[in-house]
Amino acid sequence: MDSFEMSKMAGAVLAALLLIVATNVIVTAKTASSPTQPVAGYKLPTDTATAEAPAGEAAAKEVAEAPAAAGKDGAAAPAKDAAAPAPAAGGFDAKAVVAMLASAKAEDGAAKFKACAACHQVKKDAPSAVAPNLWGIVNRPKAAQADFATKYSEAMKAKGGEWTYENLALFLHKPKDYVPGTKMVYNGIKDPAEIASVVAYLRTLADAPAPLPN
Ligand code: HEC
């Protein structure tokens, strides 16, 4: 009994001690944080206000200096850009692609055409969806797929002429260069041999494939 009373008392003392320690901690925490927080809190706006001004000035200066730097780069870049496409355009020879047609493999073109099939139907009489059906495309007048008539871009409708092998090669090499403003979202095929195989495949999409060039 005695020891029980003792431990009860000890417990009470411990509890009291704990409470004191706890309140102490809370009070110190509060007093420690309250003086610094408001000070920092009040000071901050003025600090940032004054700090922002120079930052803003610096930024303004950077902006002011930027065009000068960009101008330098800008002057150099177009020169490079202007030089780059010239050999590229000169480097691509659509006639060479046409010359490759006789030996090009339509099966390879069919494999490559998977990227085109996302948009283009190729089966005879299949309705055009997001792109004109390409059945009979070789030597067909441009923008002439009847059920796509209202959807062709103005650029494609204005292009004129027929899809000769050479025109197909030019278009497939760089659609946006051959028909600026085309709706066809496709970057083009770089490799002339690949273009030849795709055109060879397109040629097969007809009841009577167009004759191969000599
Ligand atoms: C993202 C969809 C898309 C992909 C991929 C695509 N095309 Fe097209 N293609 C179009 C659209 C749309 C048009 C109509 C363009 C216009 O009116 O300017 C078009 C037009 C054409 C034409 C002219 C058709 C006509 O009736 O005058 C040919 C040829 C052609 N594409 C071939 C290809 C080939 C070959 C590929 C793959 C190497 C390909 N396209 C990939 C959407 C696509």
Image (cartoon, rainbow, N blue to C red):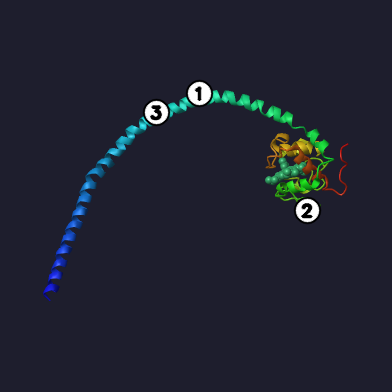
Residue 87, position as x, y percentages in the image = 70, 28
Q: Is residue 16 left or right of residue 90?
A: left
Residue 164 in view here: no
The secondary element bearing badge 3 is classed as: helix
Give how far apart the Cα atoms at labels 2 and 3 are. Answer: 64 Å
Residue at 68% across, 29% down? 85
Give how far apart the Cα atoms at labels 3 and 1 are. Answer: 17 Å
Residue at 80% across, 48% down? 135
Residue at 73% across, 28% down? 90
**Which mark, residue 57?**
3
The residue singled out by tag 1 in the image is 68
Residue 48, position as x, y percentages in the image = 33, 36
**Which mark, residue 126?**
2
Could you say which is closer to the camera, residue 52 or residue 154? Answer: 52
Nearer the observer, disc 3 or disc 1? 1
Sequence-earlier tag: 3 or 1? 3
